[in-house]
Amino acid sequence: MTEQDLMRLAVEMLDKAYVPYSHFPVGAALECGDGTVYTGCNIENAAYTPTVCAERIAFFKAVSDGRRDFRAIAVAGGKDGVDACTPCGVCRQVMAEFCDPETFQIILAVDAKHYDIYTLKEMLPKGFGPSNLTE
Ligand code: THU
């Protein structure tokens, strides 16, 4: 799957976002090592704190399906159509649990036509992850 294809799937998820409070839809598309894609959208809640970001929905769908091997995630979101949405700290930490910081790619929409690509290490420098707990 190309970066453009993955981003297109993330953008398609904007329509599924449940955002009655922030009106800030986010879509994500997570590609596994074998090319399988899991999508996610943010799902908000009247009590606010149960809200879950699009990226974590995609990860938890995949992990609950037995997946552990991930290549890249595309993320798009914003109040005005396809826009930039950079992953929150909690989502970066979830990525660090399952992904190699050196190689996992985070593809972020800039606008409807452009995106930037970062490694997880760039987005979570000096992060704490599973390797910190191994002896
Ligand atoms: N949100 C995401 O879905 N992903 C992020 O990385 C940042 C924020 C959602 C949470 C909430 O529903 C809305 O965007 C505004 O914070």
Image (cartoon, helix red, strand yellow):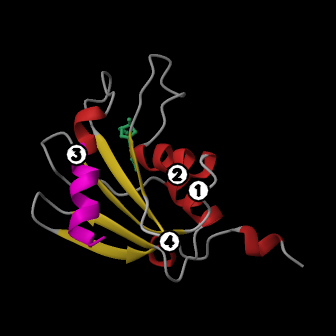
Ligand 1, seen in the image, is in the quarter at top left
Which amino acid type corresponds to the residue marked 1 in the rendered image? Val
How far, Cα to Cα, is label 1 from label 2?
8 Å
Q: Nearer the viewer, residue 93 or 64?
A: 64
Looking at the image, do the residues carrying marks 1 and 2 touch, with CB atoms under 8 Å apart? Answer: yes
Left or right, residue 135 beside residue 100? right
Instruction: Provide residue 115's location: percent of width, then percent of height.
Output: 21, 68
User: Is the residue under label 1 in contact with that under label 4 (CB below 8 Å)?
Assistant: no
Residue 123 lies left or right of residue 82; in this view the side is: right
Disc number at residue 12? 3
Question: Disc number at residue 33?
Answer: 4
Q: Position of residue 16 (x, y in %)?
A: 29, 33
Distance CA(mark 3)–CA(mark 4):
22 Å
Residue denoted by label 2: 59
Which comes before the other along the chain, label 4 or label 2?
4
Q: Note whether ligand 1 is within 8 Å of mark 1.
A: no
Q: Is mark 4 within 8 Å of ligand 1?
A: no
